[in-house]
Image (tube, helix red, strand yellow):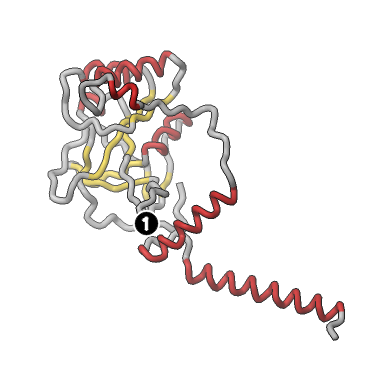
């Protein structure tokens, strides 16, 4: 016969064993591990945690301006021309935007670059950079942008940067738009900083969203630790 006191002791023992097994599993799992096998497991557990948490209302101070199917149908080409982008940027400033982040790679010089540059210069704007293919020549960057300080070991052979034209770099900050899908093909993460090679050397660029938040907050300096576990920004 199990007495109430013994039942309580057994329940406490069971709870202790469950906690120890959970701690052991976490020790083996290493949340944030970048290996393909563990990353796949962590990705699915991350999905489960977000489903358990439920949806959150979007922040009222952030708006996404998208070129939808209806807008694209009226254009001769995509991506949109610099004239079309300049028109949207000017309208956003007029509507009260305080920071604009353009998720476009505006690499090739176009004849209407001055129009877009003039629109970007009306406020605090961020334009995208990305990694070029291995072996591509590293361009000279007029605006190297980047983080004030990055801790950790030097990056191993960072890829060359793909940056906007000089005319656009002169009037906007830079943020990287490089993303990597998980082993299951799902996009869950974006590195808060990314090292890329320029003609002047290695530069560390914040993610587009990080650069936009920093511009909004007026943050002149911020610290990044890109080493995964224990990283901070």
Query: Mark 1 — residue?
Result: 184
- Looking at this view, name the residue that lies furthest to the bottom: 1
Residue plotted at (38% across, 24% down): 124
Q: Quadrant of the N terminus?
A: bottom right
Q: In front: 122, or 110?
A: 110
Residue 134: x, y in percent? 17, 51
- Left or right, residue 83 beside residue 27: left
Q: Position of residue 96 (x, y in %)?
A: 46, 17
Residue 15 against residue 178 in the figure, above or below: below
**x%, y% of residue 224?**
41, 48
Q: Position of residue 155 (x, y in %)?
A: 28, 55
Q: Residue at x 41, y 37 (%)?
A: 209
Q: Is residue 129 above or below residue 159?
A: above
Q: Residue at x 55, y 49 (%)?
A: 51
Mark 1 element type: loop
Q: Pick the residue in front: 11 or 167.
A: 11
Count residues near mark 1 (Cα–Cα under 10 Å), then give few for <14, some for 14-19, many for 20+: few
Q: Hey, which residue is sitting farthest top in the picture?
A: 94
> Camera-side residue: 169 or 44?
44
Q: Which one is nearer the viewer's eye here, 213 or 50?
A: 50
């Amino acid at each position: 016969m199990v007495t109430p006191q013994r039942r309580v002791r057994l329940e406490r023992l069971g709870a202790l064993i469950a906690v120890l097994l959970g701690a052991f599993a976490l020790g083996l799992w290493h949340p944030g591990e970048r290996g393909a096998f563990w990353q796949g497991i962590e990705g699915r557990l991350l999905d489960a945690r977000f489903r358990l948490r439920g949806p959150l209302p979007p922040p009222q101070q952030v708006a996404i301006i998208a070129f939808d199917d209806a807008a694209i149908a009226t254009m001769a080409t995509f991506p949109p021309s610099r004239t079309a982008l300049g028109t949207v940027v000017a309208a956003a400033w007029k509507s009260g935007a305080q920071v604009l982040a353009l998720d476009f790679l505006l690499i090739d010089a176009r004849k209407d670059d001055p129009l877009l540059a003039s629109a970007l210069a009306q406020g605090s704007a961020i334009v995208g950079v990305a990694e070029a293919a291995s072996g591509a020549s590293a361009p000279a960057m007029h605006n190297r942008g980047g983080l004030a300080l990055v801790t950790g070991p030097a990056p191993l052979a960072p890829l060359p940067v793909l940056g906007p034209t000089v005319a656009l770099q002169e009037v906007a900050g830079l943020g990287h738009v490089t993303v990597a899908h998980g082993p299951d093909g799902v996009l869950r993460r974006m590195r808060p900083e990314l090292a890329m090679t320029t003609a002047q050397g290695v530069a560390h660029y914040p993610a587009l969203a990080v650069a936009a938040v920093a511009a909004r907050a007026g943050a002149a300096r911020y610290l990044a630790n890109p080493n995964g576990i224990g990283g901070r920004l």
